[in-house]
Image (tube, grey):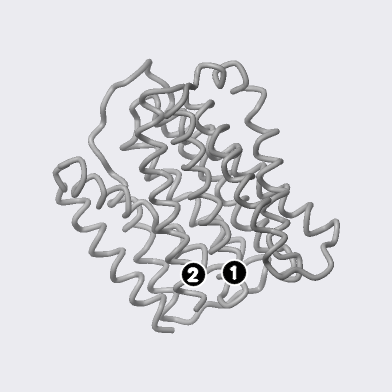
Amino acid sequence: MGALLALASALFYGLSDFAGGLLARRAPFGAVALAGQVGGLVLAAAAAPFLHAGDVAAADLGWGALSGVGTGVGMLFLFRGLGRGAMSVVVPTSAVAGVALPVLAGVAFLGERPSPLSWLGIVVAVPALWLVSRGTRTELGPAGPPTLDGLIAGVGIAVQYLALAQADPSAGVWPIVAGRVAAIITILPSAAKASLRLRGPVAMCAALTGVAAALALLCYLFATQYQLVVIAVVLSSLYPAIPVLLGITMLRERLSLAQAGGLAAAAAAIALLTTT
């Protein structure tokens, strides 16, 4: 069950990133990120009362808020890099950093001990993420430091995963609600003015990317209740495969040899991580 939920998280995150990446080419990246978090907050707040929760401690909301800060930082720098046309650098860098840091933290600080097969799956997943995320560079804006954007986004994603996993299961979805509020507060100062330029369908689509991301977090949160955080993070982090597959099937993009190898390695990693 934990593995399936983590893979569902990857699916929803992949859909969110695919749509968000397209929108970031048409609208300010900060506005897209902010509208997405608002959409995620609406979904999480609507779902929270209907999903079982016991006592919600202040610490659980605190962990959720810290996770949301990581989300806000991660999305801002990810969309900034995408808006600059540096997808081939930003996405793989953020994906690898976002999975490597939680794995190291899980082993070093949480005392988690994956099995030998799981370790092999983790080792295979890291280069798979890099290869599958490598796209064709397109220049859409001024030159910038795409590697730094990717690294900062990866740190934010790592904080999002690690902090959310520390919330007690009895808190239900409320840590995610707290996280969406914190993400909005994090993004708002740099995106408030740009958000006024979002109109109609674009704003609605941006909000829907946040709904998909919130669903991904829901699946991930429940996955950590059945699975080691290390394994749940790695499986959830395989989401870059989804935009690649959608690009091939919907946008008629060509699959590079490196991406094909990455997809094959990702499939091998899933097999190793779900059979332990």
Residue sitting nearer the eye, 118 or 255: 255
Mark 1 neighbour class, 10 Å CA radius: few under 14, some 14 to 19, many 20 or more: many
Query: Residue 50: image x %, image y %?
Result: 68, 64
Residue for point 47% across, 42% down = 209
| CB within 8 Å, label 2 to label 1 | yes
Image position of 59 (left or right of 6): right
Q: Is residue 269 above or below residue 191?
A: below
User: Mark 2 sits on what residue?
Assistant: 5
What is the spatial separation of the Cα atoms under label 2 and label 1, in whole angstroms? Answer: 7 Å
Q: Is residue 244 above or below residue 261?
A: above
Residue for point 71% across, 63% down = 166
What is the secondary structure assignment of the residue under circle 1? helix
Image position of 35 (left or right of 270): right
Residue for point 78% across, 59% down = 60
The number of numbered discs placed on residues in the rendered structure image is 2
What is the secondary structure assignment of the residue under circle 2? helix
What type is the residue that disc 2 sits on?
Answer: Leu
What type is the residue that disc 1 sits on?
Answer: Phe
Disc nearer the start of the sequence (2/1):
2
Q: Is residue 240 above or below residue 23?
A: below
Residue pushed farthest bottom? 276
Where on the picture, by quarter, is residue 86? top left
Label number found at residue 222? 1
Residue sitting nearer the eye, 204 or 156: 204
Query: Residue 43: image x %, image y %?
Result: 60, 50
The quarter of the rendered structure image containing the C terminus is bottom left
Query: Residue 64: image x %, image y %?
Result: 71, 53
Mark 2 neighbour class, 10 Å CA radius: few under 14, some 14 to 19, many 20 or more: many
Label number found at residue 160? none
Query: Residue 272: image x %, image y %?
Result: 36, 77
